[in-house]
Image (cartoon, helix red, strand yellow):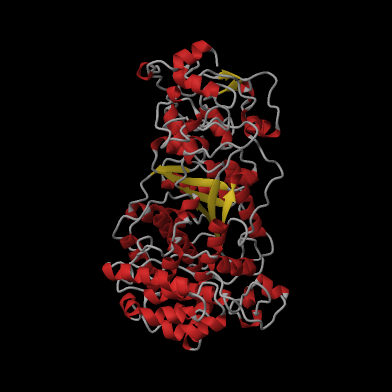
Amino acid sequence: MPPEVRHRAAGKRGGYGVKLVRGPFVRLEPHADSCADAGELAAYVGRLRAENPRQLLAADLFSGAGGLSLGLEHAGLQVVLGVDHDPEATETHRHHFGGLTLQEDLFDPAKVDAIAELIRSLRLEVLVGGPPCQPFSRAGRSKIRHRVRLGLAEAHDRRRDLWESFLAVVRQVEPTCVLMENVPDMALDREMFIFRTVVHTFEDLGYSVEARLVDTSTYGVPQFRQRLIVAAVRGGARFVWPEGTPERVPLWNAIGDLPEVEGGWRPEGGADGWSVYEPTGPLTAFQQAMRARIPRGQRNRVYDHITRPVRDDDRAVFELMDSTTLYSDLPDEMKRYRDDIFDDKYKKLDEHSFSRTITAHIAKDGYWYIHPRQSRTLTIREAARLQTFPDHIRFAGPPSAAFRQIGNAVPPRLGEHLGGALLASLTTEPAAPRPSTTELAARLTAWFNEKKEAALPIPWLAARTRWQVIVGEILFERASTDQIRLLWPLVSAWETPAATVEAAGSFLESASWIGRKPRAELLLDVARWLIGHPDVLDAPDPTGRIPHVAPSVLDLAVLTVRTTDVDGSPEPVLGGRGVLRLAARYYGSDVDHHNRMSDGRMAIARLVGGPGTAREAHLALIALTNSVCRPSDPLCDECPLSAGCTMAMAGPGRSKEPATRQTA
């Protein structure tokens, strides 16, 4: 770094402001086929059906700028209704798509009902959407669990979370196909509550459901971005996931043809201004696709190729960095933020790899998205390219609104592949239907209740107290079946921490018979702690609050033994090695080795059913992994899931060898 640059960077930090640059504010006219109201939309839909009776028409809820809508239209569907609450996003959608685009708040049950009635009256075959998911309380979960357990419809006397609004529209409309898209966090919380509720609801309405965490880079999107996709199809069809593309698009292949610009530069002409596109033209297949629909008279133009101004000290930092540099690696005099909190505050993108995920955060600052060759953050057009929005797509509002719309969008290329898969699912011979999660959970629950009356391979799965579960999990970890049968009737008689401490001598002697005295001593320490904290163990959710007891052990205790607060007690989805092995065998996948905490736990959730109905089914899975679905020579003839199990149908070897208890 030149001395003069170092000198600037080391100067007084507060003296480096940047000139505030507002705008340009892009205003977009409605599409030529835009409709002003429901009456015009009905006439428009009528014309479309008359012109092409086989055309599938779609509604896009939470449509944003229209990334998913654009992808569906590229696949051959036609979006005639978009709904979103963001005024700039609805202006963008209304400009690029015919039909009706509404700016509405889908928190409001009255609005939800009105939109559902509109979709139903138009007989739209496809409903898609990416409802944002808000954190919700235990009380909220309890109410929904209660409704799921009793088979009740959604209440209409309260403002819903947005994912519930989406489900409410599905219930009222029952379209042929549904696509629901969201961030992985929607599925991967401890209980997987929203995911399980969504799948249960769709199946209860008669849909065949498929769900997967999708890596968008496998579909030609030049960024690391995972999305949760739930696809539901009626009428006996089954959604078949689209194959990935052979093309993987690194960052420079996506944006390398765009002209160099200075941070903060604005073209003359405001919103109508543009950068000169070099006469050499696009160099890669991706770049050619991005330029393909540019109007003939604008082939030498790039719109929205603008970004934020750059402070002098930031420019010095950008020039010092490469794609591997962490903020904490920078010289102390160049840091404006605490590096113990903001260790990844700055990220220079790697031109040879994928971009990091483009999110709505880019609207607030661009430090996560520093250009790989130029000392600035990404432009609006570069961010749009990385989301696979073609260059002819414009975004309404100021630059911050454009960045927000881009970051919130579904990549159109992903939408195109999903739309193509939907069409293929409806026009090809359906695959053999899979049992629903409700059916699988019922089989498992029946098996568990039958075995509970006889002898479970893990007897504390039928425990009366959570303390018994903790003792069983810790004392008998990796114990043989014979050791468990010998000792469990004795130690289980001490049902509480107090009873165990009172019988400490006998407890230690019993444990020594199988070489587990150190574990018994640890359990006595835990029991003494619990005696001093009597309300912890039977709290609705004690996880993380009891010393020396792993969260996985407490999760099993919570799952096994309900407290008096039945509805408030969580139902964690346990993704231990044994249960993952069973799920992998059932679905014929590798979730026991790859993506265990994401795809693996989703596979388990599909076996145990919706919240409020899954405890015994989940406990059955754990019992099966320790008796029937053993690591080697599984006893498939004895498994309640064998009728649909990929491994069982393939005819695995079977034997009667005794098993060692496996981790749940």
Q: Which of 287 and 206 is in front in this view?
A: 287
Q: Residue furthest top?
A: 4
Instruction: Estimate the x, y position of residue 453 in percent, counting from the top left.
Output: 47, 88
Q: Quadrant of residue 354?
A: top right
How many numbered marks have been drawn onto this rendered protein structure?
A: 0
Along the line of sight, the residue nearer the viewer: 354 or 348: 348
162 w.r.t. 197: above or below: above
Q: In this view, does 256 lie to the left or right of 342?
A: right
At a point 41% along the width and 69% down the height, the residue shown is: 522
Q: Is residue 51 left or right of residue 283?
A: left
Q: In which quarter of the image is the N terminus?
A: top right
Name the quadrant containing residue 85: top left
* Residue 27, visible in the rendered structure: no
**Is residue 625 placed above or below 70 in the rendered structure?**
below
Residue located 72% across and 77% down the image = 653
Question: Which x, y percent locates residue 637?
Answer: 65, 82
The quarter holding residue 431 reads bottom right
In the image, residue 624 sits, relative to residue 313, either above or below, namely below
Residue 177: percent from the left, percent from the top?
Answer: 55, 58
Outermost residue, bottom side: 454
Residue drawn 40% across the image and 30% down it: 337
Residues 521 and 444: in front is: 521
Q: Residue at (62%, 33%) from the top-left corner? A: 251
- Above or below residue 98? Residue 504 is below
Residue 258 visible at all = yes
